[in-house]
Image (cartoon, grey):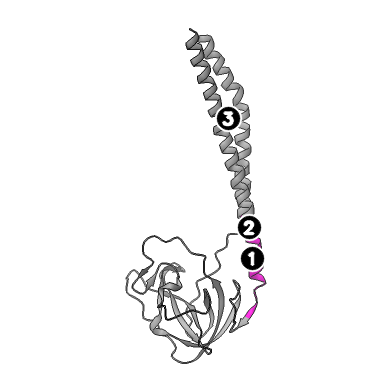
Amino acid sequence: MGIFSSNKLADGVKKKSLWWLGWGLVIVLGLVLGGWQWQRAEEKRAYLARLEAAPTLTMPETTPPDGAEVRLAGRFLAAQTRFLDNRVRDGRVGVAVLTPLVDVHGRHWLIERGFVPSGPERKDPVVDTPTGRVELAGLWQSAGQDAPLFGPNQEGNRLQRIELSAWPEALTFAHDGWLHQREGEGRFASWWTPSVMPPSRHLGYAVQWWGLALAATAVMWLGRPRARLQSRIMETRS
């Protein structure tokens, strides 16, 4: 009888421990994820402020900041054109044209020239590229904001995401990033915009996670007497 009572007591302690541990983990998770979303909102505010304050630069020697308007003069290297695959604009599937440009100082820049529809076929589109000197302008995007990659990045001249390593080593780019062309010869339809979730959405997610933590706290506390009552009923029946 004593052994049976000891086993019941141990089971009761175990159940109560799991109750507090389980709900405690939910509360901690809600608090941590809510804080993370709040921090992301602050980071997005700072990023948007940097975009707003980004300067206009002509043939910059140092790496431009994200969102800067950069003006260049040089000539395209048409033979080194690649295509960023699986782009969508106005409901049409296509590619973004990526062509290096060598400026008047001999430095290389990667230019994202815009969207070209390609349809369901996997053939590379035929694009016209100016052969002489061009002057162009666009918005700078630093490398390092990579999209998820599933499988090989390069298939022929098509890329799943922009990586400067897709071009020959002999073609050394001046800066770690690329220019989304907005003006000048050789430009196609613009499709790119900075992918930035509004800070307000992050704040909304933070409130949701904190709400989850609050609800879990209420359930954990209000459920406690019920668990104790059930334990007493089991003891009475035994």
Instruction: Name the N-terminal-most of marks 2 and 1.
Output: 1
Residue 228 figure quarter: top right
- Quadrant of the rendered image containing residue 215: top right
Mark 3 touches mark 1? (CB < 8 Å) = no
- What residue range appears in magenta? 40-56
Q: Is residue 159 above or below residue 132?
A: above
Amino acid carrying mark 3 in the image = Trp
Q: Residue at x 44, y 88 (%)?
A: 130
Q: Count how many numbered circles sit on residues in the image.
A: 3
Q: Provide the residue designation for mark 2.
A: 199
Which of the two marks, 3 or 1, is nearer to us in this view? 3
**Could one spot residue 129 in this view of the protein?**
yes
Mark 3 — residue?
20
Asked if 41 appears above or below 86 in the picture, the reply is above
- Label 3: how many Cα within 10 Å (few below 14, some 14–19, many 20+): few
Name, please, the residue furthest toward the bottom: 132
**Residue type (three-letter) at the residue carrying disc 1:** Leu
Residue receiving disc 1: 48
> Does residue 238 appear in the picture of this structure?
no
> Residue 98 falls in which quadrant of the image?
bottom left
